[in-house]
Image (tube, helix red, strand yellow):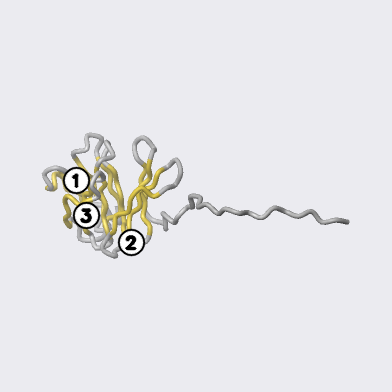
Amino acid sequence: MAMATLPLKKSYRCVPSLQRFYTGGPLVVSSDGSFIVCVCGDSIKIVESSNAAIRATIDGDSETFTALALSPDDKLLFSSEHSRMIRIWDLSTLKCVRSWKGHDGPVMGMACHPSGGLLAIAGADRKVLVWDVDGGFCTHYFKGHKGVV
């Protein structure tokens, strides 16, 4: 029985490969579904939905991110870290445009109003604070929860 010879590959071009972009924790999908913002270790990855390519990386302060939210127009990213630091990121420049601490415990969740002007932040300190995004001040303070919000 004669063995057939197989042609050996002569060129080895690079093909796209997937990189790790999510390690668990908060994530948010853009309003049109074109990209995902998620936590990867102590950084935030912005990932294309169509091909899982990493569009950008935002490095944190080596703290665990606890919540993420996008503005309705997908131009601003809101993040919070275990240290209670809340940041607003401009996604066109990847620069932090504002940061503050508003809770007595870690932030557990956040949501942006459809107008884009208000950000509600829920905390482990049993409070919900509503912030004016442009002004940087607290507009509403809800307390009375018996546990983590």
Mark 1 residue crowding within 10 angstroms, few (<14) / some (14–19) / many (20+): many
Quote the CA–CA distance across marks 3 and 1: 13 Å
- Residue farthest to the right, as pictured: 1
Helix or strand or loop: what does disc 3 sit on?
strand
Q: Pointer 3 and pointer 2: residues touching (CB < 8 Å)?
A: no
Which is in the foreground here, disc 2 or disc 1? 2
Q: Is residue 120 left or right of residue 6?
A: left
- Counting from the top left corner in percent of width and height, residue 62 is at 29, 65
Tell me which amino acid carries mark 2: Asp
Helix or strand or loop: what does disc 2 sit on?
loop
Helix or strand or loop: what does disc 1 sit on?
strand
**Numbered badge on residue 42:** 2
Residue in the picture at 38% in, 45% down: 36
Quote the CA–CA distance across marks 3 and 2: 15 Å
Residue in the picture at 34% in, 36% down: 31
Which is in the foreground here, disc 3 or disc 2? 2
Q: Nearer the viewer, residue 99 or 45?
A: 45
Tell me which amino acid carries mark 1: Val
Q: Which residue is mark 1?
A: 130
Which is in the foreground here, disc 3 or disc 1? 3
- Which quadrant: the N terminus? bottom right
- Counting from the top left corner in percent of width and height, residue 11 is at 57, 53
Q: Earlier in the sequence, mark 3 or mark 2?
A: 2
Instruction: Indicate whether 140 appears above or below 85.
Output: above
How many badges with numbers are in the image?
3
**Numbered badge on residue 86:** 3
Mark 3 residue crowding within 10 angstroms, few (<14) / some (14–19) / many (20+): many
Q: Nearer the viewer, residue 131 or 52?
A: 52
Q: Earlier in the sequence, mark 2 or mark 1?
A: 2
Tell me which amino acid carries mark 3: Ile
- Counting from the top left corner in percent of width and height, residue 84 is at 23, 59
Mark 2 residue crowding within 10 angstroms, few (<14) / some (14–19) / many (20+): some
